[in-house]
Image (cartoon, grey):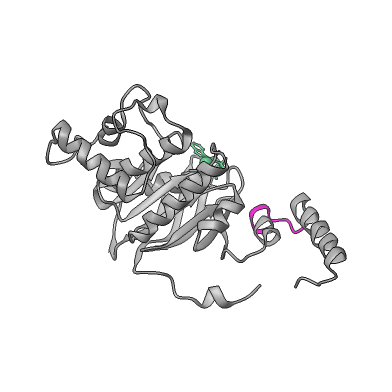
């Protein structure tokens, strides 16, 4: 693997640093000694097999679970999160996998849903303008902000959920499987959206099982395995290498298939691929 991308300094200031984060659920160690850094203007993909601890880590960062031990530094300050409101107040936003949108309410209502914690109350017109501004900043393709969520496509719903998470101007946004349920075009649109969020200078953590999506948008790829760090990679890492880190096995169906493909390609083109 080439060393060029590893030598590049990360994009901006560190937004988040975790050191030695452990999370026990009774006798189960969901997370052990996790270190993680996210910088401003950086997309970090969090990957790992089922049960690797990805969602648990996101929930610790969202204030839903409290870490058993370990330290968290956010924008240079040591912090502890007693609950989800602490995370939101600091500027950590989460788009959970189920999106938690209300089907029967329109886009504006969904964007402002549960934001009673704001010090100011907005009237309908101001809310509509704010909703449009947010969606325009994301170059989102939503036909109208007055249509119910039920009438939107999966990609459009994801867009609304992302816009909603940006309402409180967070510094870090976490997306759990943002493209899992989407088709090709909608996936591309959501990945574009993630790039736009990054370009606004936010730190982004994206969980995904799709290595193609990860490679398309991530600046760094953090692998978890059995609740532990199992390597940091870059988008130029081969699929085989990533799969090995994720599964802990050098020999598996994916690596064998990719080996066969490379051998076949070699035979067709006569070119050796390093
Ligand atoms: N509330 C809980 N109580 C007990 N054990 C839990 C709890 N939440 C998670 N775990 C355990 O912690 C481990 C990590 O789970 P987690 O949901 O974080 O994995 P994941 O990487 O998100 O997996 P997936 O890709 O399937 O979503 C698993 O062994 C899981 O059973
Ligand atoms: Mg999960």
Q: Residue at x 29, y 29 (%)?
A: 146
Q: Where residue 124 sits: x, y (%)?
A: 17, 31
Tally of marks: 0
> In the rendered image, which quarter is residue 64 located in?
top left
Q: Which range of residues does the magenta coloring cover?
A: 245-250
| Depicted 34 relative to depicted 153: above or below | below
Q: Residue at x 44, y 46 (%)?
A: 175
Q: Residue at x 57, y 58 (%)?
A: 215
Residue 10 shows in the view = yes
Q: Quadrant of the C terminus?
A: bottom right
Q: Nearer the viewer, residue 181 or 125?
A: 125
> In the rendered image, which quarter is residue 228 located in?
bottom right
Q: Quadrant of the N terminus?
A: bottom right
| Depicted 78 relative to depicted 226: above or below | below
Residue 228 shows in the view = no
Is residue 146 part of the magenta span, yes or no? no
Report whether 148 appears left or right of 116.
Answer: right
Q: Nearer the viewer, residue 44 or 127?
A: 127
The furthest residue to the top: 104
Q: Where residue 5 sits: x, y (%)?
A: 54, 73
Q: Nearer the viewer, residue 53 or 156?
A: 156
The furthest residue to the right: 267
Report whether 194 appears left or right of 179.
Answer: left
Q: Where residue 82 sits: x, y (%)?
A: 29, 45
Q: Where residue 85 sits: x, y (%)?
A: 26, 42
């Amino acid at each position: 693997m080439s060393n060029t991308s590893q030598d590049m300094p990360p994009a901006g200031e560190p937004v988040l640093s975790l050191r030695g984060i452990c999370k026990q659920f009774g006798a189960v160690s969901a997370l052990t000694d996790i270190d993680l850094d996210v910088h401003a203007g950086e997309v970090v993909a969090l990957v790992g097999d089922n049960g690797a601890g990805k969602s648990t880590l996101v929930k610790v960062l969202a204030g839903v679970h409290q870490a058993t031990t370990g330290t968290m530094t956010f924008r240079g300050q040591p912090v502890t999160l007693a609950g989800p409101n602490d995370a939101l107040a600091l500027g950590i936003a989460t788009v959970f996998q189920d999106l938690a949108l209300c089907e029967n309410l329109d886009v504006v209502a969904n964007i402002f849903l549960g934001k009673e914690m704001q010090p100011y109350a907005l009237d309908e017109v101001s809310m509509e303008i704010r909703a449009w501004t947010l969606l325009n900043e994301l170059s989102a393709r939503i036909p109208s902000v007055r249509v119910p969520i039920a009438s939107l496509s999966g990609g459009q719903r994801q867009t609304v959920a992302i816009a909603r998470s940006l309402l409180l101007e967070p510094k870090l946004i976490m997306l759990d499987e943002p493209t899992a349920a989407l088709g090709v075009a909608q996936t591309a649109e959501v990945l574009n959206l993630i790039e736009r969020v990054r370009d606004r200078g936010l730190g982004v953590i994206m969980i995904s099982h799709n290595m193609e999506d990860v490679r398309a948008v991530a600046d760094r790829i953090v692998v978890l395995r059995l609740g532990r760090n199992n390597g940091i990679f870059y988008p130029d890492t081969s699929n085989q290498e990533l799969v090995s880190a994720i599964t802990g096995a050098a020999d598996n169906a994916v690596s064998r298939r990719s080996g066969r493909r490379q051998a076949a390609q070699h035979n067709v083109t006569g070119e050796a691929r390093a």
